[in-house]
């Protein structure tokens, strides 16, 4: 008899931010000991709502404290996890338009602002590369059409 195995990928539930400045630039972070850039945010703790988790992570990682009303939901998205080949991240993604200075803290080693139309050669987590960057470009296009 053949043996059937069900090796569903482990799901990591996170809340993550697409942070945009008024000039259209978007913020990516690199965590300590890692080599790829990703969204600010992190795991949703037991009993926490995604937005609550995100607000906590942004305060810890970037020293910013937006009000919950400043976030706009961008839905739930799944992608291969950046550093864990057997896992996927399932992310509640939120848009935050913010011009205040960010101060990387906690586990964040580096932050970069990606500017529209400028190419920077950096490694990105799959969620960022495949989902967030296309969403960012879509939002930039919508913003341009409104002007
Ligand atoms: N924050 C964030 N994590 C991501 C993204 N993409 C992605 O694969 N991940 C992965 O999702 C996991 C999030 O865990 P984390 O370690 O950043 O979250 P945390 O600060 O709440 O974790 P900890 O309290 O366990 O240290 C990591 O394995 C991270 O590599 C992303 O865009 N943003």
Image (spheres, rainbow, N blue to C red):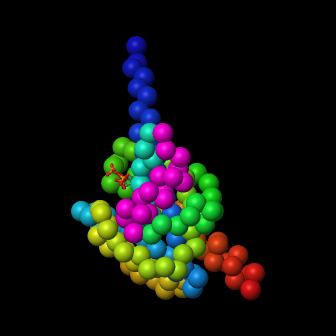
Q: Quadrant for residue 105, please give it.
A: bottom left
Side (left or right) of 138 relative to 21? right
Q: Quadrant for residue 75, please give it.
A: bottom right
Query: As rendered, which of 37 and 19 lies closer to the eye?
Result: 19
Query: As rendered, which of 106 and 30 lies closer to the eye?
Result: 106
Quadrant into which the N terminus falls: top left
Residue at image point 69% right, 79% down = 143
Q: Residue furthest left?
A: 33
- Magenta residues, as a range? 47-63
Residue at image point 74% right, 81% down = 145
Query: As rendered, which of 12 and 127 lies closer to the eye?
Result: 12
The answer to whether 49 is drawn above or below residue 8 in the figure is: below
Quadrant into which the C terminus falls: bottom right
Q: Position of residue 35 (x, y in %)?
A: 29, 66
Whether residue 88 is visible here, answered yes or no, is no
Magenta span dominant secondary structure = helix
Ligand 1, by image quadrant, is bottom left
The answer to whether 6 is drawn above or below residue 27 in the figure is: above
Whether residue 99 is visible here, answered yes or no, is yes
Residue at image point 53% right, 50% down = 50
Q: Position of residue 132 (x, y in %)?
A: 53, 65
The answer to whether 111 is drawn above or below residue 57 in the figure is: below
Q: Position of residue 15 (x, y in %)?
A: 49, 54
């Amino acid at each position: 008899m053949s043996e059937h195995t069900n090796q569903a990928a482990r799901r990591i539930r996170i809340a993550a931010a697409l942070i945009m400045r008024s000039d259209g630039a978007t913020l990516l972070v690199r965590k300590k000991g890692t080599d790829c850039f990703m969204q600010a945010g992190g795991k949703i703790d037991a009993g926490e709502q995604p937005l609550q988790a995100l607000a906590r992570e942004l305060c810890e990682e970037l020293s910013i404290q937006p009000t919950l009303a400043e976030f706009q939901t961008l839905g739930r998205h799944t992608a291969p996890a950046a550093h864990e080949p057997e896992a996927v991240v399932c992310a509640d993604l939120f848009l935050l338009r913010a011009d205040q200075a960010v101060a990387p803290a906690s586990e964040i080693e580096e932050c970069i602002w990606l500017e529209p139309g400028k190419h920077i050669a950096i490694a990105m987590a799959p969620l960022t590369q495949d989902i967030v960057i296309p969403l960012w470009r879509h939002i930039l296009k919508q913003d341009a059409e409104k002007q």
